[in-house]
Structures are given as C-alpha cells and as structure tokens.
Image (spheres, grey):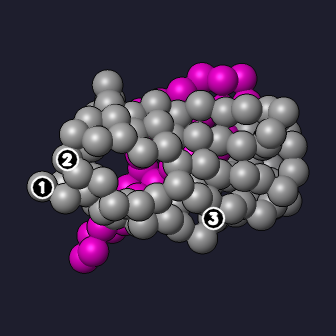
Amino acid sequence: VQLQASGGGLVQAGGSLRLSCAASRSISSIPVMGWYRQAPGKARELVALINSGGATHHADSVKGRFTISSDNVKNTVYLQMNSLKPEDTAVYYCNANSPLDARFRGWGQGTQVTVSS
C-alpha cells in the first residue's frame, strides 16, 4: 500500500493542525493504521493507532489533545492535533500494518510539524 501524508506546518503553541494520510487502497482492508513521529536525535515513537473496526489507542503524551480517525470512503486516516506544545515538534509518519499480508504494510513519506513557543 502507498501512503501520502499531508497537513504539517508551523504553528504556535496552543494551536491546532490536522494531518491526513491518504491510502492507495481501501483502508477497511488494512488491520491497523497509525501515526508515528520522530524528533531530531530521538527514536521514532508511536502517537496513535486505529484498527479496521474503529478502535483507537493514543500515546499517553498526546491523550486528550490528539485524536486519530478514519474515513473509509476517502481511504484516509486523520490526526487532529489540538493544544500543541513545542515538544510535539517532529516529523510525523503514517503507517499501515498487517501481520499476515505484506500488501497492506507501508510508511508515508513524513510531514513536518513545528510548534513554536
């Protein structure tokens, strides 16, 4: 699967951004999709996951501020980010994962999110 991430940018602390991840195939056939981020000098970390049934998981660091959602008609996964903090600054990557089928695995190209204080 090919993934195209968009929506990053520069925002002041306390602001909001919405990231989008458009998939090249039906996301209802992809068991799990998610958002990860990588800040300079740090390892890539999980931000949020959503499965094909709509269940979600958010990292403790973003819980209550970020929300992952999906639109099966548009084959797009979103990450709504509110109350942004400077420590949210990172390159954000979308991911598709399937334990059983390599056709449903992949990474998007990344989109930069910069939060100024």
Helix, strand or loop at label 3? It is loop
Return the residue at label 3.
108
Magenta highlight on residue 43: yes
Q: Which residues are magenta?
A: 32-58
**What is the crowding at mark 3: few (fewer than 14 residues within 10 Å), some, or many (at least 20)?**
many
In the rendered image, the quadrant that contains the C terminus is: bottom left
Return the residue at label 2.
13
> Residue type at mark 2?
Ala
111 vs 74, left or right, is left
Q: Which of the two labelled residues, at mark 2 and mark 3, occupies the earlier sequence position? A: 2
Q: Are marks 2 and 1 in contact (CB under 8 Å)?
A: yes
Q: Nearer the viewer, mark 2 or mark 3?
A: 2
> Residue type at mark 1?
Ser
**What residue is at 77 percent from the left and 64 percent from the top?**
2
| 109 relative to 19, above or below | below
User: In this orientation, does residue 92 appear?
Assistant: no
Where in the figure is residue 78, as x and y percent of width and height? 58, 40
Provide the major secondary structure of the magenta segment.
Answer: strand
Return the residue at label 1.
117
